[in-house]
Amino acid sequence: MKELHMVTFLLTVVGALNWGLVGIFNFNVVASLLGAGSSLEKLIYVLVGASAVWFVIQHKEDCKTCVKK
């Protein structure tokens, strides 16, 4: 389960940083590295989205701030 957490964390960070760069500089790192409109680019976006959903579902279990002591 720790491995899944690490992978989803990394994908979520990549997605967030990519959106930040798109918003600030209009530069899409994923599209630049993998080719705009490629199947691999779309796969990365799907995985980033799935990672975000996973974090939302697992948030209360993992978040030390939200867990009541």
Image (spheres, rainbow, N blue to C red):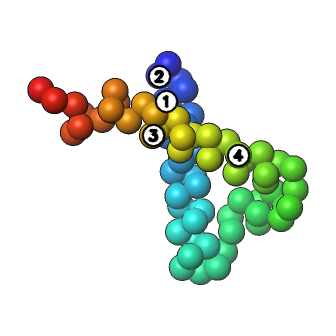
Spatial separation of the CA atoms under disc 3 and disc 4: 15 Å
Q: Is 59 left or right of 31, judged from the image as shown?
A: left
Earlier-in-chain disc, 1 versus 3: 1
Spatial separation of the CA atoms under disc 2 and disc 3: 16 Å
Q: Which residue is mark 1?
A: 5
Earlier-in-chain disc, 2 versus 3: 2
Residue 56's disc number: 3
Q: Is residue 43 above or below residue 66?
A: below
Number of the front mark, 1 or 3: 3
Q: Residue at x 54, y 79 (%)?
A: 24
Earlier-in-chain disc, 4 versus 2: 2
Earlier-in-chain disc, 4 versus 1: 1
Q: Nearer the viewer, residue 53 or 11?
A: 53
Question: At label 2, which amino acid type do we have?
Answer: Lys
The answer to whether mark 1 and mark 2 are in CB contact below 8 A is yes
Spatial separation of the CA atoms under disc 1 and disc 3: 12 Å
Q: Residue at x 23, y 37 (%)?
A: 66
Location of residue 34 in the rendering, given as x and y in whole percent from the top left corner: 81, 56
- Density class for disc 2 (Cα within 10 Å; few <14, some 14-19, many ≥20) is few
Q: Secondary structure at mark 2?
A: helix
Q: Residue at x 60, y 63 (%)?
A: 18
Q: Residue at x 76, y 63 (%)?
A: 31
Spatial separation of the CA atoms under disc 1 and disc 2: 5 Å
- Density class for disc 3 (Cα within 10 Å; few <14, some 14-19, many ≥20) is few
Q: Which residue is mark 4?
A: 46
Question: At label 4, which amino acid type do we have?
Answer: Val
Q: Which residue is mark 2?
A: 2
Question: At label 3, which amino acid type do we have?
Answer: Val
Number of the front mark, 4 or 2: 4
Spatial separation of the CA atoms under disc 4 and disc 1: 17 Å
